[in-house]
Image (tube, rainbow, N blue to C red):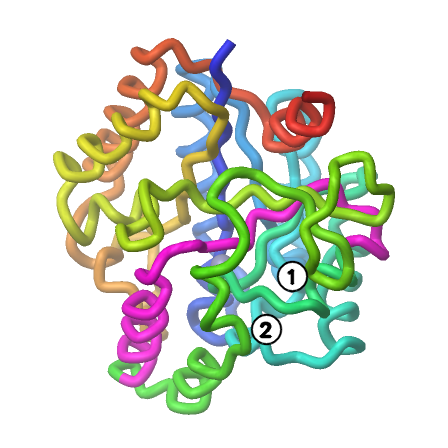
């Protein structure tokens, strides 16, 4: 059986606005989640949601997520507490706290321990890996093994500058992992807390499942690529991944199912695709992608189940 997962990096509007204290009607939660869950349900595809812990300090979000986490076909995973843009540059203590605080508030909300993680902006460091192993995580999806990491980082940097978020912009380029696209493997692999590749039976290790790539010199395959290079291009590339007949995940983002009407006019959003297209049209594009994946004989799973398959191989 060929399996895939949907990996939702659930960056909220509050995060994108820079956490304004008076803002609590976050349509990523109040509108977006229903849209994406309904689409997944239509095709029987489970959803793995990587939550930014700080969003759950908002009681409204907390209650929405609590309800959603009761579903069998939803997995809640960890996307750090503050979504710091310099996450890859934090020291050991700060990194652990960022992961642990989010782990804790998600547990308070859902009653379940997170087993999966993704870093803000795919930042990787030894501190991240060590903290995840210490907290007994099963898998991590922070590896972005492509030279497109650089234009991506540059693009996020420039869009933050354009939105006049200067200190945020400079934090984005402060990371220690610029050589990582050239290290390790494109296929899932196990790392110990010294960042060495180890056997899957090693107790002190974590499973790394990198963002799918065709080669390290091409863009990884995730939904945002469709907005940059066109959805025909994305589908063509996705077919290469599908023809490999191996498990993979498809990465999505709230901007893939929110639009301008969902944003608050009092705050600046630095994502241009938020303004350019309505959510229904974006959902239709995502639906086409789901249909394509299923037409290749793939079946959806939660990421934790893909990870368990990988461990028992
Ligand atoms: Zn994020």
Q: Which mark is residue 43?
A: none
Left or right position of 96 against 169? right
Query: Which label was assigned to residue 87?
Result: 2
Q: Position of residue 23 (x, y in %)?
A: 51, 69
Q: Is residue 146 magenta?
A: yes
Query: Disc 2 and disc 1: Cα gap in Å?
Result: 9 Å
Image point (44%, 78%), residue name: 172
The residue at the point 15 percent across, 49 percent down is 229
Q: Dot 1: within a 10 Å radius of its alpha carbon, few (fewer than 14), some, or many (20 or more) residues?
A: many
Q: Residues within 10 Å of mark 2 (few under 14, many from 20)?
A: many
Residue 214 image-quadrant placement: top left
Residue designated by label 1: 80
Q: Is residue 109 visible?
A: no
Task: Residue at 41%, 48% (x, y): give it.
Answer: 253
The secondary structure type at the circle numbered 1 is: loop
Going by the picture, which residue comes out furthest to the bottom?
Answer: 167
| Cβ atoms under marks 2 and 1 closer than 8 Å | yes
Closest to the observer, 247 or 159:
247
Q: Position of residue 287 (x, y in %)?
A: 29, 25
| Range of residues picked out in magenta | 133-161
Mark 2 residue element: helix
| 307 drawn magenta | no
Q: Name the front one of labels 2 and 1.
A: 2
Left or right: where 131 falls relative to 40: right
Q: Quadrant of the C terminus?
A: top right
| Circle nearer the N terminus (2, 1) | 1
Compared with 136, 98 (above or below) is below
Residue 199: percent from the left, percent from the top? 74, 39
Q: Residue at x 39, y 83 (%)?
A: 169
Q: Is residue 88 visible?
A: yes
Q: Position of residue 30 (x, y in %)?
A: 49, 46
């Amino acid at each position: 059986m060929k399996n895939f997962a949907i990996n939702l990096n659930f960056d909220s509007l509050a995060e994108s606005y820079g956490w304004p204290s008076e803002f609590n009607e976050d349509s990523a939660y109040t509108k977006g989640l229903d849209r994406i869950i309904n689409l997944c349900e239509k095709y029987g595809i489970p959803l793995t949601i990587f939550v930014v812990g700080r969003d759950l300090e908002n009681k409204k979000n907390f209650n929405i997520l609590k309800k959603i986490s009761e579903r069998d076909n939803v997995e809640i995973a960890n996307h750090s507490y503050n979504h710091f843009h310099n996450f890859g540059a934090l020291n050991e203590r700060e990194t652990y706290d960022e992961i642990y605080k989010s782990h804790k508030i998600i547990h308070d909300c859902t009653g379940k321990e997170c087993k999966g993680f993704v870093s803000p902006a795919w930042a990787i460091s030894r501190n991240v890996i060590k903290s995840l192993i210490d907290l007994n995580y099963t898998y991590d999806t922070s590896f972005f093994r492509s030279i497109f990491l650089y234009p991506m980082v540059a693009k996020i940097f420039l869009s933050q500058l354009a939105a006049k978020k200067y200190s945020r912009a400079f934090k984005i380029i402060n990371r220690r992992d610029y050589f990582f696209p050239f290290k390790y493997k494109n296929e899932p692999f196990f790392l110990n807390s010294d960042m060495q590749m180890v056997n899957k039976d090693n107790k002190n290790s974590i499973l790394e499942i990198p963002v799918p790539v065709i080669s390290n010199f091409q863009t990884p395959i995730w939904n945002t690529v469709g907005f940059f290079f066109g959805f025909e291009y994305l589908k063509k590339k996705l077919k290469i991944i599908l023809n490999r007949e191996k498990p993979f995940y498809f990465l999505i983002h709230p901007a893939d199912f929110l639009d301008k009407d969902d944003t608050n006019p009092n705050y600046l959003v630095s994502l241009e695709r938020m303004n350019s297209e309505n959510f229904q049209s974006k959902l239709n594009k995502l639906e086409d992608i789901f249909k394509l994946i299923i037409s290749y004989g793939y079946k959806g799973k939660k990421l934790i189940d893909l990870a368990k398959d990988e461990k028992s191989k």
